[in-house]
Image: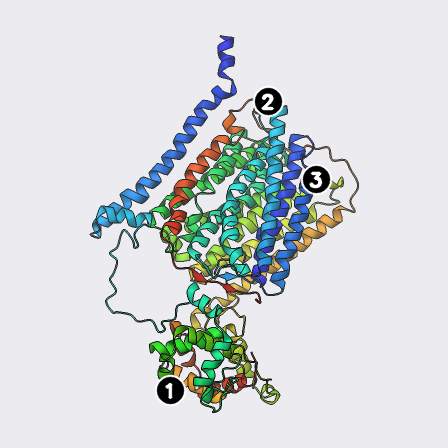
């Protein structure tokens, strides 16, 4: 129950609300025009709140202990799924508003490049529309009818395939706001300029096209797909690392510009010259370290043979906690620290505790996840509540489990400190914040090709890739239906 | 000249190479993936394993079962499932459409002599059936009929009933009320037995009984409800599972659990469940 609640809260609730709010903020501040469809945005907000209540109550009542991945045939109370659908529909309204805002801006500013922050946000919205198709089809045609008792069997292979469609790209939905901050806020916070605006655009486009046709790498050990289709998706998965490597290069170059402007000399002198006391700069440095560990762990996950060693072990849990819980969430904190003062018109009374909070988050996440990696290599399986430490093989895991638990406590402390920092801000002095938020590029773009200013071409390419990656793998379930699994319902009938 | 250069900076002219090269790049990556993953690697691996190219490609695509790099091993030993009951949608439909009133006629004719008209059995060696899960009764009757479970009396009786009658009888007994729990035995269950029921014993790979036998716990469909069962009957079943004499439990779940239990634990669990705990 607690793992389901944790997964749902962190993966669906926290992310969706944060990303929606950040998107609205970017649409207003980067485009410098009022948000279209404000009423719709509020409708979506309340719809999502109702959705959260519908999801949380069945979990609390023990009728939805299905984890956030809810693989059938175990099915929760129908309210759980209907609540999730409401959250997704609310996010679709957000997507429509983001696309509309960019479209209106382009009509008012013909030929001008869309500001990078908004370009990234709309890339995320377009990707999210593609992403949610898989889980929406699974919920509407398979899981909800099963939960309601309309059907007695469910094709679990098809359900897992449809969920894999969503499962990898959803991670990029969470990640892109952090990347928007890397490209548009961090160079400014460091006192420099963005090294290349084009790199940013290419990065967001690569995320759009390569985050979708790759989800089958979550199903490498599943028997329902051929080796060939798995190979195609693994090859495409390799290309997902490209936008991250581009970003590491571009942001490091941007920070070097800032460091040299501040008087840094020599090969590494610019690093120490950076203003590490500023939360956004510190968070970026810490995020890059976690991205490094998590990213190399991810390279292990994506290789078919190596995946077999760590499949369903704590290694995987460690990987996504480092990338999402670590790099991405620490950037969410940094964004909150930048955005909250602008929304409330108040300054942080002191940024010392902001830094302490970020350091604690980094330390806690590293202490928690590095032992998990090691335990995963020793075969510690995930998704279980406890282990039998009386077994001599498992007994050796005990000390490392205690270390990772200590990391979890540090994280809890950091999360509480984050809340405190935001509350204290409201007691800060009221001040109109005049410093600009978004960074200028070294060579600000005056005119960009339509391909880097919109998503028409890329949507066509996504369609082609998805047809190849998921066309036959999904069609096979209709051509050769497999025996369905009996639905196990958790809720009292 | 100026006209020429301004024409060259028109958005659609700027865009053309992007359109072409982006498509070429993405399609090339995809084509490389298809060529390597579906054709070259399977054919090469297949030829090493003595599999023809066509079969290897079909296996890589998932059209034929098996790996392109390995021969499918034929099953030499014929395997027999421990039970012939398959919980297909059709079987569930038969259970859902069963008629308790038709079942009552059969019960009075055949079953009541031992299991009682209300499902409260007349001798300790016969199980109580009142309020038992319909799916559990159906599976056991079906297993007797197909020989997956044997009993001098039940095998012959079950063979005389057709599938619809099995479901009717099961529905009739499932609809009978349960008796009240016995408060005395409830209070006297030792903590070690309660521990086995609620937590199990990980050291011996014994899962908690309640993880399947508590109604609504999400265990296999055929899991029987144990509360208020006669303790002699439960001990006899655990003993025969442990000895491998009764073997109609799917995946050998109960055989492997019962083999880990001591005689005292079997008795303790039986009296725990007689008390009416779920």
Residue A283, position in %: x, y? 60, 44
Tags 2 and 3 touching, CB below 8 Å: no
Which sits in the foreground, A378 or B148? B148
The disc placed on residue A39 is: 3
Residue depth check, mark 3 versus mark 1: number of the one nearer the observer? 1
Judge if badges 3 and 1 mark residues of a common chain: no
Task: Identify the residue under disc 2.
Answer: A110
Residue A313, position in %: x, y? 45, 59
SS at circle 2: loop
Instruction: Name the residue at 47% across, 47% down.
Output: A165
Residue A416, position in %: x, y? 68, 55
10 Å crowding of disc 2: few (<14), some (14-19), many (20+): few
Judge if badges 2 and 3 mark residues of a common chain: yes
Distance in Å between CA atoms under marks 3 and 1:
73 Å
Residue depth check, mark 2 versus mark 1: number of the one nearer the observer? 1
SS at circle 1: helix
Task: Identify the residue under disc 1.
Answer: B153
The disc placed on residue A438 is: none
SS at circle 3: helix
Q: Is residue B148 above or below residue A308?
A: below
């Amino acid at each position: 129950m607690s793992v389901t609640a944790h997964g749902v809260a962190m993966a669906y609730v926290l992310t969706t609300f944060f990303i929606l709010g950040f998107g609205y903020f970017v649409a207003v501040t980067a485009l410098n025009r009022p948000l279209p469809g404000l009423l719709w945005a509020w409708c979506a907000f309340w719809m999502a709140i109702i959705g959260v209540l519908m999801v949380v109550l069945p979990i609390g009542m023990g009728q939805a202990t299905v984890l956030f991945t809810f693989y059938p045939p175990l099915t929760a109370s129908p309210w759980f799924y209907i609540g999730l659908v409401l959250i997704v529909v609310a996010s679709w309204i957000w997507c429509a508003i983001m696309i509309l805002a960019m479209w209106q801006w382009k009509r008012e500013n013909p030929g001008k490049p869309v500001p990078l922050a908004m370009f990234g946000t709309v890339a995320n919205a377009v990707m999210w529309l593609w992403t949610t198709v898989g889980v929406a089809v699974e919920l509407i045609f398979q899981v909800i009818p099963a939960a309601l008792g309309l059907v007695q069997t469910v094709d679990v292979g098809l359900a897992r395939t449809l969920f894999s469609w969503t499962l990898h790209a959803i991670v990029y939905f969470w990640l892109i706001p952090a990347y928007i901050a890397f490209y548009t806020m961090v160079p400014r916070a460091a006192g420099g300029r963005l090294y290349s605006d084009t790199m940013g655009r290419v990065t967001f486009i690569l995320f759009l096209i390569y985050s979708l046709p790759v989800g089958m790498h979550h199903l490498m050990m599943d028997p329902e797909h051929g080796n060939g289709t798995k190979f195609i998706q693994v090859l495409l998965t390799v290309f997902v690392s490209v936008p991250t490597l581009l970003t590491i290069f571009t942001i490091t170059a941007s920070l070097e510009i800032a460091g040299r402007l501040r008087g840094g000399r020599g090969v590494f002198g610019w690093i120490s010259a950076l203003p590490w006391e500023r939360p956004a700069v510190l968070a970026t440095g810490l995020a890059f370290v976690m991205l490094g560990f998590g990213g190399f762990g991810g390279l292990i996950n994506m290789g078919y043979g190596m995946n077999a060693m760590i499949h369903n072990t704590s290694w995987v849990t460690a990987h996504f906690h480092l990338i999402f819980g670590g790099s991405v969430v620490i950037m969410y904190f940094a964004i909150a620290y930048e955005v909250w003062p602008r929304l409330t018109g108040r300054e942080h009374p002191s940024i010392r505790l902001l830094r302490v909070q970020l350091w604690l988050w980094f330390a806690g996440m590293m202490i928690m996840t590095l032992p998990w990696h090691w335990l995963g290599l020793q075969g510690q399986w995930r998704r279980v509540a406890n282990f039998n430490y009386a077994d001599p093989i498992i007994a050796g895991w005990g000390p490392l489990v205690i270390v990772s638990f200590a990391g979890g406590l540090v994280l809890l402390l950091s999360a509480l400190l984050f809340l405190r920092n935001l509350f204290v801000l409201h007691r800060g002095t009221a001040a109109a914040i005049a410093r600009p938020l978004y960074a200028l590029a070294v060579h600000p773009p005056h005119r960009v090709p339509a391909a880097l200013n919109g998503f028409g071409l890329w949507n066509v390419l996504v369609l082609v890739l998805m047809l190849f990656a998921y066309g036959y793998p999904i069609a096979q379930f209709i051509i050769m239906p497999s025996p369905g699994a009996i639905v196990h319902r958790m809720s009292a009938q | 000249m100026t006209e020429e250069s301004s024409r060259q900076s028109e958005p659609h002219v700027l865009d053309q190479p992007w359109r072409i090269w982006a498509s070429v790049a993405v399609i090339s990556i995809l084509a490389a993936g298809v060529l390597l993953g579906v054709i070259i690697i399977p054919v090469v691996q297949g030829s090493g394993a003595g599999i023809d190219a066509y079969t290897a490609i079909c296996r890589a695509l998932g059209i034929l079962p098996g790996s392109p790099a390995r021969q499918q091993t034929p099953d030499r030993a014929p395997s027999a499932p421990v039970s012939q009951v398959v919980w297909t949608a059709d079987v569930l439909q038969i259970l859902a459409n069963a008629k308790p009133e038709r079942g009552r006629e059969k019960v009075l004719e055949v079953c009541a002599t031992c299991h009682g008209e209300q499902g409260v059995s007349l001798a300790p060696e016969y199980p109580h059936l009142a309020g038992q899960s319909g799916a559990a009764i159906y599976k056991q009757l079906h297993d007797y009929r197909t020989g997956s479970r044997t009993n001098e009396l039940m095998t012959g009786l079950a063979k005389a009933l057709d599938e619809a009658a099995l479901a009717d009888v099961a529905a009739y007994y499932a609809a009978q009320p349960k008796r009240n729990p016995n408060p005395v035995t409830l209070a006297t269950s030792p903590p070690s037995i309660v521990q086995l029921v609620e937590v199990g014993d990980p050291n011996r790979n014994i899962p908690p009984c309640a993880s399947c036998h508590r109604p609504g716990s999400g265990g296999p469909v055929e899991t029987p409800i144990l509360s208020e069962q006669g303790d002699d009957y439960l001990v006899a079943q655990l003993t025969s599972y442990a000895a491998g004499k009764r073997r109609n439990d799917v995946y050998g779940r109960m055989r492997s659990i019962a083999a880990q239990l001591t005689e005292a634990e079997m008795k303790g669990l039986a009296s725990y469940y007689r008390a009416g705990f779920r």
